[in-house]
């Protein structure tokens, strides 16, 4: 687990605690967390620092690392309303 705090002249304030094994802070306002902790696969998450708060950027899909063979072409959509396609996968 990683806990991020903001420290200023008035003391410290906890912004967020995030489960994970690895953290990357490239300095672009994003924090990248990955690692297999309390879930079924290596979940990779992105948090963005904005107005002294850390907010998770929701991902439409998570990479799980499994391979498979499609029996027909399918389209993956951003949400359950099936309005915005993200990618079209082709049958092999």
Image: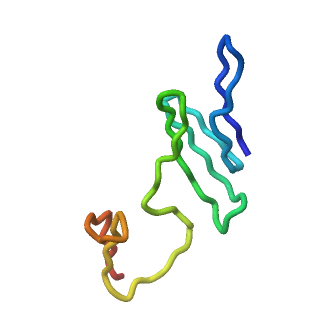
Residue at x 67%, y 27% (from the top left corner): 13
Q: Is residue 21 left or right of residue 88?
A: right
Residue at x 38%, y 88% (from the top left corner): 71
Nearest to the observer: residue 79 or residue 34: 79
Q: Is residue 14 left or right of residue 74?
A: right
Work out whether 45 lies above or below 66. above
Residue at x 68%, y 42% (from the top left corner): 17
Colour option used = rainbow
Quadrant for the C terminus, please.
Answer: bottom left
Q: Is residue 11 left or right of residue 63?
A: right
Furthest toward the top, the residue is 9
Location of residue 22 in the rendering, given as x and y in whole percent from the top left corner: 68, 45
Location of residue 78 in the rendering, given as x and y in whole percent from the top left corner: 35, 63
Furthest toward the bottom, the residue is 71
Location of residue 79 in the rendering, given as x and y in whole percent from the top left corner: 36, 66
Residue at x 31%, y 70% (from the top left corner): 81
Work out whether 39 lies above or below 11. below
Nearest to the observer: residue 39 or residue 6: 6
Choose top left, top right, bottom left or bottom right for residue 43: bottom right
- How many marks the image carries: the answer is 0
Location of residue 87 in the rendering, given as x and y in whole percent from the top left corner: 32, 66
Q: Is residue 20 left or right of residue 87?
A: right
Furthest toward the left, the residue is 83
């Amino acid at each position: 687990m990683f806990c991020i705090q903001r420290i200023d002249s008035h003391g410290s304030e906890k912004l967020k605690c995030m489960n994970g094994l690895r953290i990357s802070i490239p300095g672009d306002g994003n924090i990248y967390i990955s690692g297999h902790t309390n879930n079924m696969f290596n979940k990779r998450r992105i948090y963005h620092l904005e107005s002294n708060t850390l907010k998770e950027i929701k991902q439409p899909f998570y990479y799980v690392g499994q391979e498979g063979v499609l029996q027909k072409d399918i389209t993956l959509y951003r949400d359950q309303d099936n309005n915005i396609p993200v990618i079209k996968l082709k049958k092999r």
